[in-house]
Image: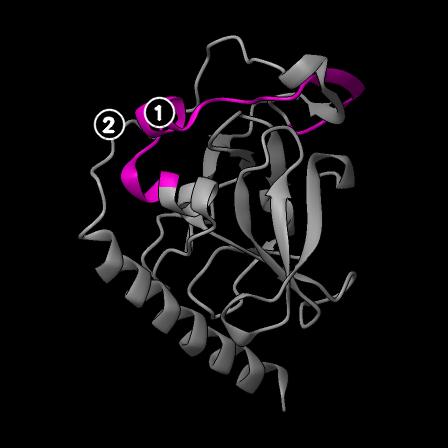
Amino acid sequence: MSHFSRRHFLGLGIGAVAASAAVAKLFAAPSAGDSSAASTATPKAAGGASVTIENFSAAGQSLGTAQVPKVVKSDAEWRSQLSGEAYDVTRREGTEMAFSGEYDHNKADGVYHCICCDTPVFDSRTKFDSGTGWPSFWQAISSKNVNKRSDYSFGMERDAISCRRCDAHLGHVFDDGPRPTGLRYCMNSVSLHFAPRAAA
């Protein structure tokens, strides 16, 4: 199956799943808040747990690694912080509808952060138009800032990508991307917060 056909097939399949999830969501309890901004409150660590991430400046330049507290919040706190759709995707591993996200066609220069904890996760310089309906990147901003795990949900074999600091579900990665990595990080817009690049 060609790369285009495979992407089209996966897009249709995941889009259908997302549509079913959206219908089911109509009967779910409403979100306690509708703010899409990342929380600025001091994060709580579970039993003193910490993780090592790579920090970046507003210009997208590496500031080196640092050990930071792992962000852990109650379900009620996440619901209060996030929009209903962002909560469903990041905390319940949902998927937004294809072509519905605000960053699918975003061509601005900047850095994409996790919507839950503001950890930098992708740089616009690695973004490309995959034609799938979700913002796609051929590389994460740092391998230290994301986690990858096997995902066999909905009868598909995929690799799920999450934020290393708060475990927010961001999307999935596939091996049909462009050079130089050959990867396609297919992300959900609602899992991300875009910050325009500052002057170096």
Furthest residue toward bottom: 1
- Tell me which label, 1 or 2, sits earlier in the chain: 2
For label 2, the residue is 32
Residue 177 on image: x %, y %: 67, 68
Occupied quadrant, residue 62: top right
Mark 1 falls on what kind of element? helix
Q: Residues within 10 Å of mark 1 (few under 14, many from 20)?
A: few
The alpha-carbon separation of the residues under discs 1 and 2 comes to 8 Å
Furthest residue toward top: 42
Q: Is 36 covered by the magenta stretch? A: no
What colour scheme does the image use?
one colour
Residue 191 on image: x %, y %: 46, 42
Q: Is residue 46 left or right of residue 191?
A: right
Question: What is the magenta range?
Answer: 60-87
For label 1, the residue is 76
- Using the image, determine if residue 132 lies above or below residue 145: below
